[in-house]
Image: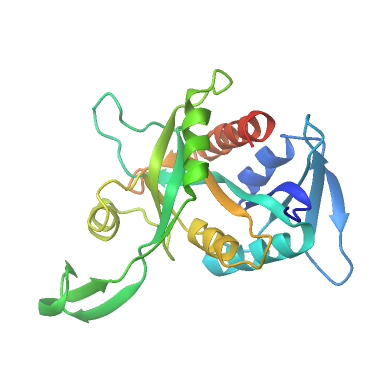
Amino acid sequence: MNNYGSLAALIYVTQSEESSVLRMYNWKTLIIDGDVQIYYEATTAKGEKIYAARTDEMGMTAAATLTMKLIDHFKPKYVIMPGIAAGASNDESSDSQQYGDVILADSIWNYSNGKYVPKDQGEIVFGEIGFLPRPTIIRIDPELRDIFKKAVLSDKNECYVHIGPLASGSKVVANKNILDSFVIGQFEDTQGLEMEAYGVAYAATHAVSPRPKPIIAKSICDFADNRKSDLYQKFAAYTSCEFVKMMLEYLL
């Protein structure tokens, strides 16, 4: 028997993500004594309690901290991160990624870990700078992977979904050379990259019992190259939240 107190807690970062999350349900603002964080509470069509909150800054540290608070306050069965990410593939093939496609992470890895060394000692080299990568990986629970496959094939799903590894790093990337060397060069099948998911997954997988399962479902708003802009952020946030809501109502 578990002691979960709610179905899910949603965590997000940007204003466009918050706007899309708050359109998902009829949320009520929730203030907890001794905590400066603003939380939101809602009920799914199935009568399940869900909660949501926005980090006060970008990055893995803020994401991990808020995830731990959500777990402590609400004991969710799932910690879910909807939102926006950069896609890692935008070629001419038939399965190429497009703006608004959902990246559903079956693993989350931190590509920032490593050591800067002299050029001749580096596995990755930029000019006179060498880098020895030491990536760390969190793999999603096999039961969730089965749910992911059902979600993609569900007749309720209206999104195009890419299941695979998602990379997290400490910097915004808008350079294809960085993308190819630091990200694709370490894990060729990586589907996208962003800045917070590893912190969310790490906090969830290292929480005390009852431990929630992390779900990262972010949609593509750019491709981490010189075309990077904010143009598709609202659209990507919307498709991500629509996919997450479908999972909440029909599969979780």
Colour convention of the picture: rainbow
Q: Taking the image as drawn, is residue 112 in sight?
A: yes
In this picture, residue 245 sits left or right of residue 173: right
The extreme front residue here reads 1
Q: As displayed, is residue 98 above or below residue 154?
A: below
Q: Quadrant of residue 239?
A: top right
Q: Residue 206: x, y in percent?
A: 57, 67
Q: Residue at x 53, y 40 (%)?
A: 233
Q: Is residue 7 left or right of residue 136?
A: right
Vertical order, 166 against 145 (above or below): below
Residue 101 is situated, as x and y percent measured from the top left of the image, at: 45, 32
Could you say which is closer to the camera, residue 233 or residue 132?
132
Identify the residue shown where x is 71% and y is 34%: 24
Q: Position of residue 190 (x, y in %)?
A: 32, 48
* Nearer to us in this view, 204 or 236: 204
Would residue 59 be visible to someone looking at this image?
Answer: no
Q: Quadrant of residue 49?
A: top right
